[in-house]
Image (spheres, rainbow, N blue to C red):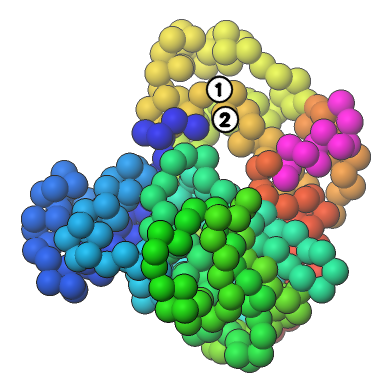
């Protein structure tokens, strides 16, 4: 994925700008330096590139001298900063529900990073990685946001939820005790991977104020935005063609002939929405895979439907797409059904 195709929802950018402005810096000057305006900043459907977000953090540290800027912003953020997905998460019944919705709707917030969920014995590993270069402040914000969410919105969050947090980057002379007090557990730097290690029992913890009706309302909003995001004009038409052709792989010429436009025009229209035909084909397969898993279909059936030569190849592809195995994804849906009203 190219850097200029990455995106961050405007609410997160506005939240970070507000956080820096609270420290006494001119909001207008900051907006001018990053080349944006209040109109785009307050448009919930507008996305900024990760380059802009990184730049805000760089300016923010220079302006405020706060070397803990990512930690403080992540810890202070409210769910609405994460758009409809954040509000949806805050109304879930259990932590497992939150993770289930994150797997489905995280692209509404940003599209350049991935979470991988791995259980080993009694421990749950929440691993994180980015497809592009990001500032360490952004990484620290991601982790502070999640630990803060548990502490603020989950019952019994004081009962040894977190075991350890690992960061790939260095401490850089900062106060480790202060950072550990923010995250509520031991923190290690210069590690092989960015991850949170917690007790697997965390999945069954309940949120303080679950609201089924409100959750369904926010889920409806998120679902509509997700459909609008991945099925816009030509994207929707090409997606339908690719789904109908599965497990066959169609060429650019074949798809363009089907739409009665030139291959060059099709490439240009897909690129306008941030896609190549190959990337859209991968997304179509991912969506079909998720729908099939939620319907309870077997891995072999899905592998054949999507054109994978072996079931193991499908499993590897799905883990790359979603950050978890097909079985883990399916269990999150089938083992956590909606309670009857």
Is 317 one of the magenta-colored residues? yes
Considering only vertical position in the picture, is 240 above or below 143? above
Q: Residues within 10 Å of mark 1 (few under 14, many from 20)?
A: many
The residue singled out by tag 2 in the image is 280
- From the top left corner, tell me how far across and down residue 225 is, in percent: 46, 53
Q: Would you identify the image quadrant in which residue 26 lies?
A: bottom left
How far apart marks 2 and 1 lie (CA) works out to 5 Å
Report the side of 9 relative to 16 (left or right): right
Residue for point 37% across, 53% down? 9
Residue for point 58% across, 78% down? 185
Q: Secondary structure at mark 1?
A: helix
Residues under numbered marks 2 and 1 in contact, where contact means CB atoms less than 8 Å apart? yes
Report the side of 280 relative to 77 (left or right): right
Viewer-proximal residue, 143 or 154?
143
Viewer-proximal residue, 189 or 125?
189
- From the top left corner, tell me how far across and down residue 243 is, in percent: 68, 31
Q: Secondary structure at mark 2?
A: helix
- From the top left corner, tell me how far across and down residue 157 is, in percent: 60, 87
Q: Residues within 10 Å of mark 2 (few under 14, many from 20)?
A: some
Viewer-proximal residue, 98 or 16?
16
The residue singled out by tag 1 in the image is 277
Report the side of 66 relative to 246 (left or right): left
Residue for point 33% across, 42% down? 51
Is 19 one of the magenta-colored residues? no
Q: Would you identify the image quadrant in which residue 41 lies?
A: bottom left
Considering only vertical position in the picture, is 315 above or below 71? above
Residue numbers of the magenta segment:
309-319
Viewer-proximal residue, 266 or 140?
140
Considering only vertical position in the picture, is 307 above or below 300? above
Residue for point 40% across, 34% down? 3
Do we see residue 218 in this rendering?
no
For the C terminus, the image quarter is bottom right
């Amino acid at each position: 994925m190219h850097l200029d195709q990455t995106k961050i929802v405007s609410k997160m950018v506005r939240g970070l700008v507000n956080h820096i402005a609270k420290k006494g810096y001119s909001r207008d000057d900051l907006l001018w330096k990053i080349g944006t305006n209040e109109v785009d900043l307050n448009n919930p459907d507008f996305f900024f590139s990760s380059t802009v977000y990184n730049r805000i953090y760089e300016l923010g540290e220079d302006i405020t001298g706060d070397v803990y800027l990512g930690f403080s912003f992540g810890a202070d953020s409210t769910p609405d900063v994460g758009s409809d997905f954040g509000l949806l998460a805050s109304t879930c019944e259990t932590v497992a529900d939150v993770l289930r919705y994150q797997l489905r709707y995280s692209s509404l917030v940003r599209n350049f990073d991935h979470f991988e969920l791995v259980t080993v014995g009694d421990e749950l590993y929440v691993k994180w990685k980015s497809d592009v270069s990001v500032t360490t402040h952004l990484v620290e914000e991601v982790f502070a946001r999640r630990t803060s969410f548990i502490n603020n919105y989950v019952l019994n969050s004081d009962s040894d939820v977190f075991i350890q947090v690992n960061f790939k980057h260095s401490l850089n002379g900062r106060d480790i005790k202060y950072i550990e007090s923010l995250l509520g557990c031991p923190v290690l730097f210069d590690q092989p991977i960015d991850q949170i290690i917690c007790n697997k029992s965390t999945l069954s913890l309940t949120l303080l104020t679950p609201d089924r009706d409100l959750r369904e309302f926010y889920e409806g909003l998120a679902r509509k935005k997700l459909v609008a995001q991945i099925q816009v004009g030509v994207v929707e038409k090409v997606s339908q063609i690719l789904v109908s052709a599965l497990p066959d792989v169609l060429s650019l010429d074949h798809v363009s002939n089907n739409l009665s436009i030139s291959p060059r025009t099709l490439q240009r229209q897909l690129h306008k929405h941030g896609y190549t035909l190959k990337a859209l084909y991968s997304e179509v397969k991912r969506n079909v895979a998720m729908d099939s898993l939620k319907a309870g279909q077997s891995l072999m059936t899905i592998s054949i439907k999507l054109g994978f030569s072996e079931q193991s190849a499908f499993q590897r592809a799905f883990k790359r797409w979603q950050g978890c195995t097909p079985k883990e994804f399916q269990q999150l849906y089938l083992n956590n059904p909606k309670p009857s009203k």
